[in-house]
Amino acid sequence: MNRKYLTLILLFIILITIYFFPVPSIPFEQLYAKVDAKQTASLQNFRQTYPPKQIEVKGVKWEYVSLGAGKETILFLHGMTGAHDIWWQPMSALQDRYRIISVTYPAVDRLEDLSDGVLKILDTEKVDKVNIVGSSLGGYFAQYLVATQPQRIQRAVFANTFPPNEIIAEKNRTIGMLLPYLPEWLVMNVLDGSFRDSVYPASGKSELTLAFLMEQSHGKMSKAQVLGRYRCVVQPFAAADAAKLNIPILIIESDNDPLVELVLRERLKATYPNAKVHTLHNVGHFPYLNMPEAYTKMLEDFLK
């Protein structure tokens, strides 16, 4: 074979190998080595006690947990780099008074598809109306549900999130265009850098927050899920007038949130002027991980 063609073939093989290089797996014990032992045991116990249920919606597999007892139901909606059990601490604390459902978003890339999945889960669990608690992307999705399914919402919590806007899409236009073509390992490396360099310091260097997020980017979450969630974040929709709908709203924000800039936090409050607002100090983007007791108390006070 011609040496030139052989070189090209070898180069192609090398490039393909590099592109599809798997994301390195990190053992649970290593990821959580610096986390308080009681918190680690609590998470492991939750996962063993409440393994996720599965349901297929329009050919897509969803995972969720359903637990607790109570006349009212709380639906927890996580952010871009979360999963159903990221809320395990508030869920564990509230399950004796509320029925609780928490979902993991599969690789869908429209808010309509997220809505279809969640509504199917609620119908399967025979839940008519819910209190929604959503953070980040989950808070954005919660706003979408208030706008499109108000008859099924009792109260809503929009936490560490943003209203419909053009800012996020504009600032992330390049990465948004490149994301479908980047290798999975590179996408996860970029996320790891964000976790370490911005999310971790803003959380007060919470080892639990860093460990849980690193677990997502090292096997729990796929690039397809990241891409789908990003597309949902930048999908526009018309926000509801929650006051006219008579749906009580609570906004939870952090004054040092590294992922939701001040202008978006202010726009959120302007979009829902009748909302109650809790501004947390120096707790970062994941306060339900690094200050779960105080976070749960805020939810309890609002839901009462």
Image: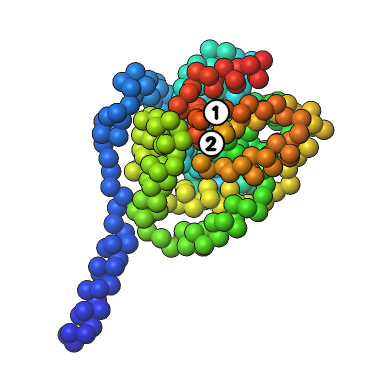
Q: How many marks?
A: 2
Q: Residue at x 50, y 34 (%)?
A: 284
Q: Quadrant of residue 208?
A: top left
Above or below residue 11? Residue 87 is above
Q: Residues within 10 Å of mark 2 (few under 14, many from 20)?
A: some
Question: Residue 128 placed where, x, y %?
Answer: 67, 27
Pointers 2 and 1 in contact (C-beta within 8 Å): yes
> Most extreme residue toward the top, as rendered?
96
Nearer to the camera, 197 or 64: 197
Label ID, residue 256: 2
The amino acid on which the numbered mark 1 sits, given as a three-letter code, is: His
Q: Amino acid at mark 2?
A: Asn
Q: Dot 1 surroundings within 10 Å: few (below 14), some, or many (20 or more)?
A: few
- Which numbered dot is residue 115? none
Callout 1: SS? loop
- Mark pair 2, 1: CA separation: 7 Å
- Res. 229 in view: yes
As helix, strand or loop, the secondary structure at mark 2 comes to loop
Mark linked to residue 281 = 1
Q: Position of residue 245 (x, y in %)?
A: 79, 32
Quadrant that contains the N terminus: bottom left
Looking at marks 2 and 1 on the same chain, the residue that comes earlier in the sequence is marked by 2
